[in-house]
Amino acid sequence: MKALLVKYKSVIKFMLTFLLVYTLLSFTYKLYLKYSDGTLYYPDYFTHLVAKQSEALLGTLGYQTEVTPHPDEPSMKLITNGIYLGRIVEGCNSLSVIILFVSFIIAFSGHPKTTFFYILSGSVLIYTVNLLRIVFLIMGLLYYPEYQEILHTVIFPAIIYGMMFLLWIVWVNRFSKQKKVNA
């Protein structure tokens, strides 16, 4: 048993670190959502921010867009060119994806400074790609409403999770300590 633990020490360390960081960040995020009462920013600050930034990006591209609080659920309605095309809910703010990304990077940590800057730049990139994903999804729904299901459930989630996966691959192959140990 001891030989088995020694053999898989790095795998066990990765799994435990990942689970610990993921649990801690997820718990913190759930507390944030629980105590976001929606009085200042509805439904919560980050979801509200993503909705407003999506509105601004679509406006920059020439679409008449407005976001308004949804009256029946904690979300923001996104109306483009007079058509209610979708809603931005908590899951659209990319924080859950960023938590998953950060947990993996910390579990495969490298030099502290490199780890910090990779987490920061990767999180900004994921957030930005998520905003672009929402904008292109809305444009897709405007012009191709018959493809709503595949756009929303397959193509656009693949973009955000694909980005995170590519960032993980770059991290493991270029920056993590694990690469140096196994090389």
Image: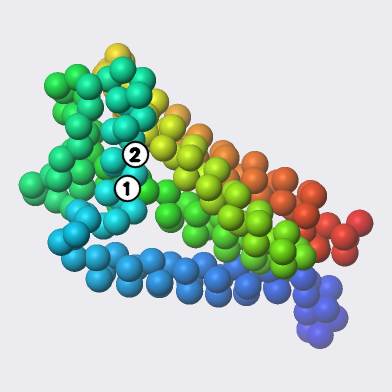
Amino acid under disc 1: Leu
Q: Residue at x 37, y 48 (%)?
A: 93
Query: Residue 104's x, y, as percent?
Result: 62, 60
Label 1 crowd bin: few (<14), some (14–19), many (20+), radius 10 Å: some
Circles 1 and 2: CB atoms closer than 8 Å = yes
Q: Is residue 153 left or right of residue 7?
A: left
Q: Gap in Å between the C-alphas at discs 1 and 2? A: 6 Å
Q: In the rendered structure, which amino acid carries the disc numbered 2?
A: Gln
Q: Secondary structure at mark 1?
A: helix
Q: Which residue position is annotated with label 2?
A: 53
Q: Name the image quarter holding residue 77.
A: top left
Query: What sort of colour scheme is used for the picture?
Result: rainbow
Looking at this rendering, what residue extends furthest in the top direction?
Answer: 143
Q: Is residue 82 left or right of residue 113?
A: left
Foreground pick, 120 / 169: 120
Task: Between residue 134 and residue 42, name the one nearer to us.
Answer: 42
The quadrant of the image that shows the N terminus is bottom right
Q: Quadrant of the C terminus?
A: bottom right
**Residue at position x 87%, y 64% from top?**
181
Residue sitting at x 42%, y 54%: 95
Residue placed at 49% from the left, 37% from the top? 129
Q: Is residue 9 left or right of residue 122?
A: right
Q: How far across and down, in percent of the image, does residue 84 sit? A: 16, 28
Q: Quick one: which residue is furthest to the bottom in this view?
A: 2
Label 1 belongs to which residue?
49
> In this view of the protein, which residue sits in the foreground, 43 or 151?
43
Q: Position of residue 15 (x, y in %)?
A: 64, 69
Question: Helix, strand or loop at disc 2?
Answer: helix
Q: Is residue 44 above or below residue 142?
A: below
- Left or right of 115 on screen, residue 160: left
Q: In terms of image quadrants, where is residue 43?
A: bottom left
Mark 2 crowd level (few <14, some 14–19, many ≥20, 10 Å Cα)? some
